[in-house]
Image (cartoon, helix red, strand yellow):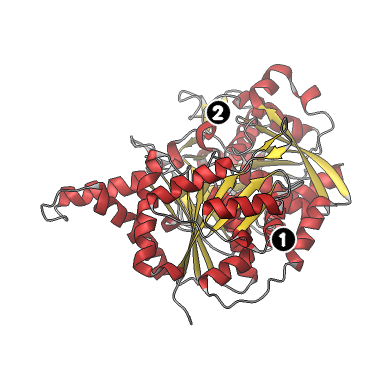
Amino acid sequence: MSHPTKYIFVTGGVVSSLGKGLAAASLGTLLEHRGLDVVIQKFDPYLNVDPGTMSPYQHGEVYVLADGAETDLDLGHYERFTQCECSKLNNLTSGQVFESVIKKERRGDYLGKTVQFIPHCTDEIKERIKEVTERTKGDVIITEIGGTTGDIEGHLFLEALRQFSLEVGRDNVCFIHVTLLPYIAAAGEIKTKPTQQSVAKLREIGVQPDIIVCRTEHDLDEDNRAKIAMFCNVEAKNVVAFRDVAHTIYECPLDLRRDKLDRLVSDRLGLESETPDLEQWRHFVDRVINPTFELTIAVVGKYTELQDAYKSIYESLVHAGAAHDARINVKRIDASQLAEEGPATLLRDIDGILIPGGFGDRGIEGKITAAKFARENNIPYFGICLGMQIATIEFARHVCELKKANSTEFDQATQHPVISLQAEQEGLEDMGATMRLGASDSTVLPGTKAHELYGSEVITERHRHRYEFNPNYREQMEAAGLTISSVSATTGLVEIVEISDHPFYIGAQFHPEFQSRPNHPHPLFSGFVKASLKQG
């Protein structure tokens, strides 16, 4: 590199859920299109070591990385919007910081010193940034700080960043503060006071933002831009509007480009880079917004009322839809409701059925009903993780006539445990990070639908599960017409099941949604959408 690594720290103020992750990911997109090598990471102030044991109601989906790290869903944005392949180093929580500090204290690493928040915890945070710098060698490292400025749990991270900026030189650091500009309808005005207060709180900590990104429903006029600049001690051109996008989150980089956020950052950091060519990105966005075709996919799940619970699945459907010039209308169906009301009404006029991953027995019978409905009515079916297990249970019950077939997750005494606990999971007491996690290789069998879609006999996919297809039932189920089309390259565990004489009936034990990208949809999602278009 002709210059030292540059650092961008993205903080947030006023309220949570402002879109800091999308702002960071969008900036990463723009900088990559300027020819820079970008690395993105997320610092989360919560005390959980990782979100693996957190409910989707609390946290949304858990995004699994190739190395098995269970992380914040914003890392999904990072990997979808940029070429950055994240690892466990890219997500740091307060829980990890404190766990590491306490372990060092117990080992005597601090040589008898009193262990304190400063310097020991802040040093731990800075060391993570340094480690990512050394291992990735990126031109730019973007670090998003979770939470809201002023939250007590986030203070340590902000203090660490303040120290770090002095250590590496202020010219190598750009602070971006994402804040809310509320529109008060009764007054007919955008209010800048919350932004002023948020920046004032940040400056009390010792951090002066270089750029302020304002989330707003409306365009930012020059008067308000000038007011924010004056009270927040930044240049007017460094007050950037981040407008609500009309159709898709993939419009966000294009919106931030309007105020030339990438150029402001490049100028601030002294980066020599090209003007970004966003033509391919614009083309993808246009295919998402203005498709020729339209279809409806039913997502039958447990957390369907939460947009973030199946975030990567919804985005993967968008990618596959764009590739096939189709708008995907997702019909979210609560599995428990389906069990009560039946499929005739809830699954009417559906072009495809998708059952995502999950844990626990709530809604299981409804999901089995959906799988049966898809199989018997030749409706394209795609089961992911639990959805693959559901397809297996349904087939065992209604085709193999094993009436009591079930998973030992839901019925430990089931007469026919066609899905059972992995052998290495027996006796585990800790819930966190003890599942089968991360990427592993599988063999895809020639002559199958899966092989046709992948075009390869070896695939690498990411996993997150405890239970598996019980190999004791494989011969019986294959004889009845269930095709095993992929198995683990190392353990022989069943990875993909399918029904050959069905338009599309595939269950994958892994999570393909974690590897789908704009302009590069995952082959299973692409095949599912293509089959569903034919259905319509």
Residue ID for mark 2? 406
Q: Would residue 221 be found to the left or right of residue 179 on screen?
A: right
Q: Nearer the viewer, mark 1 or mark 2?
A: 1
Q: Would residue 536 be found to the left or right of residue 444 on screen?
A: right
- Identify the image quadrant of residue 262: bottom right
Residue 432 makes an appearance in the image = no
Percent x, y of residue 58:
50, 33
CA gap between label 1 and label 2 equals 54 Å
The numbered mark, 1 or 2, whose residue comes first in the sequence reads: 1
Look at 59% across and 37% down and name the residue there.
309
Q: Amino acid at mark 2?
A: Asn
Q: Nearer the viewer, residue 183 or 111?
A: 183
Q: Would residue 319 be found to the left or right of residue 414 on screen?
A: right
Residue ID for mark 1? 258
Label number found at residue 363:
none
Look at 36% across and 65% down and name the residue there.
166
Percent x, y of residue 403:
61, 23
Of all residues shown, which one is farthest toward the right? 292
The mark tally for this picture is: 2
Of all residues shown, which one is farthest toward the bottom? 2
Q: Nearer the viewer, residue 164 or 397?
A: 164
Q: Amino acid at mark 1?
A: Arg
